[in-house]
Amino acid sequence: MRNRSSLRTRPDAAGQVQDKPPAQAAPAAGTRRRGALVPVLGRYRRAEIIAGRLAVAAVIVIFWQVASASGFINPVFYSSPSAIVSLLAHQFTGQDVQGTGLWVQIGVTVEEVVIGYAIGAAAGILAGFVIGRSRLLTRALEPYILTVYAVPKISIAPLFVIVFGIGLTSKVAIVLIEAFFILFYNTFRGVLQINEQLVQVAQVMGASRRAVLLRVLLPASLPSVLAGLQLAVPFAVIGAVVGEYVSSSRGLGWLVLYAGSTLNAAQLFGAIVLLVIIVWLLTRVVGFCVHRMAPWLPRESGSGQRTPT
Amino acid sequence: MTSVSVSAPRSGRRRGDRRTGAETLSVILERGVPPLVTAVVLIGAWQLCVATGLLGASVVSEPSQIAVLLWHTLQGQQLFGASIWTDLGVTIRAIIYGYLIGTAFGIVLGYLLARVDFVAQVFQPYVEAIAALPKIALVPLFVFIFGIGITAEMVNAALMVFIIVLFSTFSGVASAPEQLVAAARVMGAGRWTVTSRVVLPAALPSVLVGMRAGVSFAFVGAITSEFIAATSGLGWMMQQATAAYDTEALFTGLIYLVVLVWLLAQVIGLLQAWLLRWQRG
């Protein structure tokens, strides 16, 4: 019951109860819905909620458009929805500011993200397992792991640009570091939390090291590893964008910065919209794969708490 | 003899986990030595690699050189025309203001969203969209709107902190045990009493987790902002160092950053321990 908080649950679940339950609609002592400390889905009709959402979107878009057109907000700074849409449409079909299509910028960023994420995630899982299963390494490294986890990894972006140059490699390295630490930390925690009795029972029953690894350790740490895989997606995109901020000549991060420094608000908002779509799509793809790998785990809806930056 | 005299008073004490001096020392050795060894080995290997030419000193610098520069900056040596204390001051101010603003908004809105069901459901996709948005993409926008300076940094840090505190507050408030709330009501507690005595204490651990994570995000916000457009601050200094290929200054900046993050996390940790002191046992 309690887990059905509305930020986590898909809208579909809201439509199951079509009418407001009368008992809950008649609160005691005249206070509105006193019993509803925990938001319970199904109190409102699905149509009401969808209408509410559309209304919010419509209000924002219309206000933005009208205010910008009438000069209430300065279109130089805030652009307008129609300008953003027409600019994006124009750049997708024709040329963007660099004379190529927008697809090139998207491709550059996605390439950095995918390569860095794949290597970083694999290395992070491996390192998490090795260090988490070794008592000596855990003891020797734990204070550093905790400190490094708290330090924003993007702060080493300038260093990577010096070491790896301004090309693809430095961005891949930043994405890699972001993905590595999230996967490493999640795996490490997952491995440390494995019930040692399970391992002992398997060993008593004569399981080999390999069998213990494959049958006990991997499945037991899987939820935490998979959560890390999803959590790392937005961070990977952030790594690529920051890398492009520090030094680059292409990519969506470059485009955002370029638009900012040339006072091109429509381009700036357009690039931000594209980044949001990329994060959303990649999260969905990884979420789908995770769900296929471990269908018994509860499915994380959307991004929620897990994608804070 | 000694072992008897050591163990006898210990078992006599009510709190069995209080340690004698020798035991404390051994625990310190056991906990402290491996990390120290790690540090010595890593720094030593780094220094050796540079000394033997395995790594280019121009690329990764030398630990000893970094230590020297660190010491000089502490004494007021200027880096890129500004004292490190000026840079630290700017960054710390941006982070603290941003952190406080973001936390305040996050707690209030998270609470409201969790308490008012319809609003929560209507805004759910928007909150998710903001969560999925790479907030650093907004940095150029803020610089663009607020100009180069501490305001843009602050707004950026505040936004990052806001999002995470919003989520943690929301989940904390939403998970307040309903039976406790019902029990408090049965005993005649009013709305305010229920909120202050039941809901907020129940939500507090979760809120504090968010606030702790928020420290790191406040840094991301402020530092990224300084990377992009600033005229002072730690991030600005590091960006200058990158442009000048000055890895010693870059590493010095990184060390200050790590210390700063660590210090702030400790402060929040103490706050957490103090606010949740009832939770122990």
Image: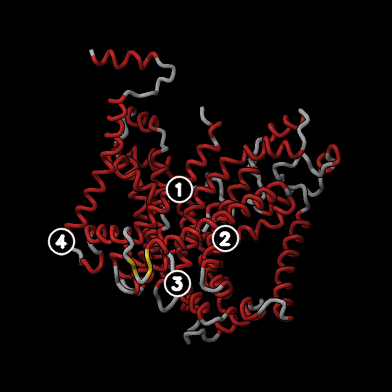
Q: Residue at x 31, y 45 (%)?
A: A141
Left or right for A276, reference A26: left
Tell me which numbered mark, 2 or 1, is placed earlier along the sequence. Answer: 2
| Amino acid bearing label 4 | Ala
Question: As drawn, which residue projects farthest toward the left?
Answer: B52
Q: CA distance from mark 2 to mark 1?
A: 19 Å
Tell me which numbered mark, 4 or 1, is placed earlier along the sequence. Answer: 4
Residue B231's disc is: 3
Residue corresponding to mark 4: B51
Q: CA distance from mark 2 to mark 4?
A: 45 Å
Left or right for A34, reference A160: right
| Amino acid bearing label 2 | Leu
Q: Nearer the viewer, residue A171 or A258?
A: A258
**Number of the front mark, 1 or 3:** 3
**Quarter location, residue B178:** top right
Q: Residue at x 63, y 54 (%)?
A: B105
Residue corresponding to mark 2: B159
Callout 1–callout 3 Cβ contact below 8 Å: no
**Does dot 1 land on a helix, a strand or a loop?**
helix
Mark 2 neighbour class, 10 Å CA radius: few under 14, some 14 to 19, many 20 or more: many
Tell me which numbered mark, 4 or 3, is placed earlier along the sequence. Answer: 4
Q: CA distance from mark 4 to mark 1?
A: 35 Å
Callout 4–callout 3 Cβ contact below 8 Å: no
Tell me which numbered mark, 2 or 4, is placed earlier along the sequence. Answer: 4
Does residue B77 appear in the picture of this structure?
A: yes
Residue B265's disc is: 1
| Amino acid bearing label 1 | Ala
